[in-house]
Amino acid sequence: MEHWDVVVVGAGPAGAAAALAARRAAPSTRVLLLDRADFPRDKVCGDGIAPEALDVLQRLGVDPAALTEGFAPVPRLRLRSPGGAAVERAMRRPAHVVPRQVLDARILDAALAGGAELRRHQVRRLTVHDDRVEIDGALTADVVIGADGAESVVRRALGLAPNRPDRMAVALRGYAPEPPGQRGVQVIATTEQRWPAYAWSFPLGDGRANVGYGELVSGGASRTALVEGLHRLLPGVEPDGLRAHRLPLSTQRPRQPDGRVLLAGDAASLINPMTGEGIFYAVLSGALAGAAAASGDRAGRDHRRALHRRLGRHLRHSSAASLLSRWPRIMDAAFRAAAADQRVFDDVVDLGLADGRLTLRTLAAAARRLP
């Protein structure tokens, strides 16, 4: 039976980052990436990339300029609260909007250039032994990293339950002509109707925008309801290629078990509950998993500890913010505070798009603006 040091299931950003990190930690490590699709392939997503995600990849040896080549920086963010409070400001650092068909292929190419190998294969079964993990009766590995998305086969093989409907969102995404006046501005709009829910419009810089709408599965989110929500919040937008995807929110994360099987990205329910952002979490958790893979049978423990050290406090704060946001008037107050204070705006952006915290400054400023 064919044996590898590390097998990564899923070759998207989390999986490719894991492969890069495993090879960087020990250049002799034999890493095999498995994915059910050929690349380049599309992935339903908002396509927004926070600069912190590029920072993680740069530390793994990937040139951020190569990943974003051909796509202009997006320096501003416009937010609208459920009650209509609006703020638009420059972000501390610009974001980028790169279609996942392009971005994922570029990160994967970097992993392959770094010595990992790729094979098209849909994983169906994992068997965990004391000294190895067996995959579909055809491969074995010292460590397996599950970076296979919201419907993760690897997560199911560990016996970990899926997220409850109130900890799972669903979003619809398509592409449309860029709305007038939106060049260089990412837009996120919320509404009290079917709250918590939001729409987005992220400009690609080529005359098109990635547009979409998402809400909790527990709200009874049918395709019709999602399309209606998109048109309600982004009137006049007529996107092509609408596709839906599920978002397992970080408010219900599985506990990373001990042993030789690790989880990263969506498979670990690492989706920001406020914004639906997942690429930063994906590349960061993938990098941590790849580094932990060198620990063999202690990899699960080491990965769990690394995730806790790096993201634990942020995830507690984002969960608390998500709970507070269930009251729309609190969101209104927070957005009014962000409109009045650049530092509060920066804190809100860091919490929603990277690894920021719910600061006392933001809480106090929002409290002063409650009705």
Image: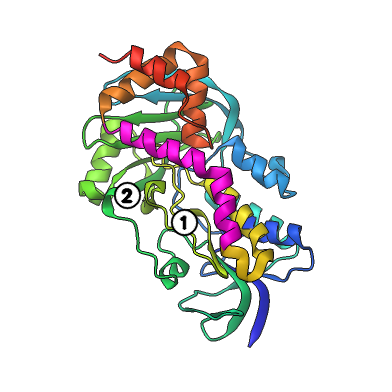
The circle on residue 167 is: 2
Outermost residue, right side: 28
**Above or below: residue 6 compared with residue 212:** below
In x, y percent, where is residue 324?
32, 31
**Above or below: residue 188 compared with residue 163:** above
Mark 2: few/some/many CA within 10 Å (<14, 14-19, 20+): some
The circle on residue 268 is: 1
Q: In this figure, what is the number of numbered marks?
A: 2
Q: Amino acid at mark 1?
A: Ala
In-front residue for pair 189/156: 156
Rendered residue at 66%/81% (across/down): 3
Q: Which residues are magenta?
A: 301-326
Is residue 172 visible to the viewer in this orientation of the structure? yes
> Which SS type dominates the magenta stretch?
helix
The circle on residue 326 is: none
Query: Is label 2 in a helix, a strand or a loop?
Result: helix
In-front residue for pair 326/151: 326
Mark 1: few/some/many CA within 10 Å (<14, 14-19, 20+): many
**Which quarter of the figure has residue 131?**
bottom right
In x, y percent, where is residue 189?
35, 29
Q: Please identify the quadrant where the C terminus is shown.
A: top left
Rendered residue at 44%/47% (across/down): 271
Q: Is residue 184 left or right of residue 158?
A: right
| Label whose residue precedes the other's in the sequence (1 or 2) | 2
In x, y percent, where is residue 8?
59, 67
Q: Amino acid at mark 2?
A: Arg
Outermost residue, bottom side: 1
Is residue 203 visible to the viewer in this orientation of the structure? no
**Which quarter of the figure has residue 331?**
top left
In x, y percent, where is residue 148?
49, 63
